[in-house]
Image (spheres, rainbow, N blue to C red):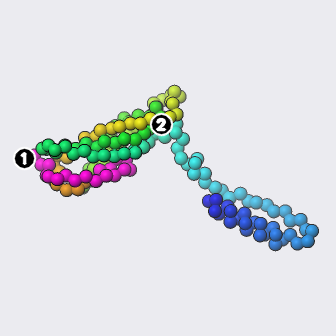
């Protein structure tokens, strides 16, 4: 956007210099170009309810049936936001999890990020050996299930 504004400014200067010959005074008018302030598009920390994920690890234990956990580390915008639920779904070989957050009502929020760590058990019962993708919010990681996890 700054690039476009700079080009318009340079073109305006050329127009002014081309029109000003001798002692003629030329009045230039600048029509403001609507700009998008990317900072204003971002949510303010006090309005941000997102669980931001910094780290996603998958631990698989040597047991049968195989047990696996996801360890999610990240931060919330302030102390009024908390993780209230974890929604889980499965589509083929992609296991999807969503960290659902809620905001506490009131103005006693400390506008400082605070860290969280969640341990999420993965339901691997009935899965066949192979590679699986785990997606938590927008972060993905792949893990391998070495043996069929089918109890007979």
The residue at which mark 1 appears reads as 152
Is residue 146 within the magenta segment? yes
Relative to 49, 145 lies left or right: left
Q: Is residue 17 above or below residue 5?
A: below
Q: What's the residue at 55%, 48% (across, down)?
A: 41
Q: Quadrant of residue 25?
A: bottom right
Q: Is residue 88 visible?
A: no
The residue mark sitting in front, 1 or 2, is 2
> Which of 110/95 is in front?
110
Q: Is residue 127 visible?
A: yes
User: With respect to residue 16, does 86 lie above or below?
Assistant: above
> Residue placed at 22% from the left, 53% from the top?
144
Q: In x, y percent, where is residue 38?
A: 57, 51
x and y percentages locating residue 30 in the rendered image: 76, 60
Q: Which residues are magenta?
A: 134-152
The furthest residue to the left: 152
Q: Gap between marks 1 and 2, in whole Å?
A: 47 Å
Q: Position of residue 12 (x, y in %)?
A: 75, 66
Tell me what residue is drawn at x 37 percent, y 41 percent.
73
Q: In the picture provided, is 45 more to the left or to the right than 67? A: right
Q: Is residue 78 magenta?
A: no
Where residue 54 is drawn, which disc sits there?
Answer: none
Name the quadrant containing residue 3: bottom right
Mark 2, other Cα within 10 Å: few <14 / some 14–19 / many ≥20? some
The percent coordinates of residue 40 (x first, y second) are 58, 47
On residue 113, which mark appears? 2
């Amino acid at each position: 956007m700054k690039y476009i504004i700079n080009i318009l400014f340079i073109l305006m200067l050329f127009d002014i210099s081309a029109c000003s010959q001798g002692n003629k005074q030329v009045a230039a008018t600048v029509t403001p170009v609507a700009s998008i302030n990317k900072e204003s598009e971002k949510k303010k920390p006090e309005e941000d309810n997102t669980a931001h994920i910094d780290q996603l690890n998958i631990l698989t234990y040597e047991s049968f049936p195989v047990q696996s956990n996801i360890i999610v580390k990240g931060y919330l915008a302030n102390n009024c936001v908390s993780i209230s639920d974890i929604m889980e779904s499965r589509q083929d070989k992609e296991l999807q999890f969503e960290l659902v957050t809620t905001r506490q009502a009131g103005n006693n929020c400390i506008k400082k990020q605070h860290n969280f760590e969640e341990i999420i058990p993965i339901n691997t019962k009935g899965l066949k050996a192979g590679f699986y993708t785990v997606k938590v919010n927008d972060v993905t990681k792949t893990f391998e299930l070495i043996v069929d996890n089918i109890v007979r």
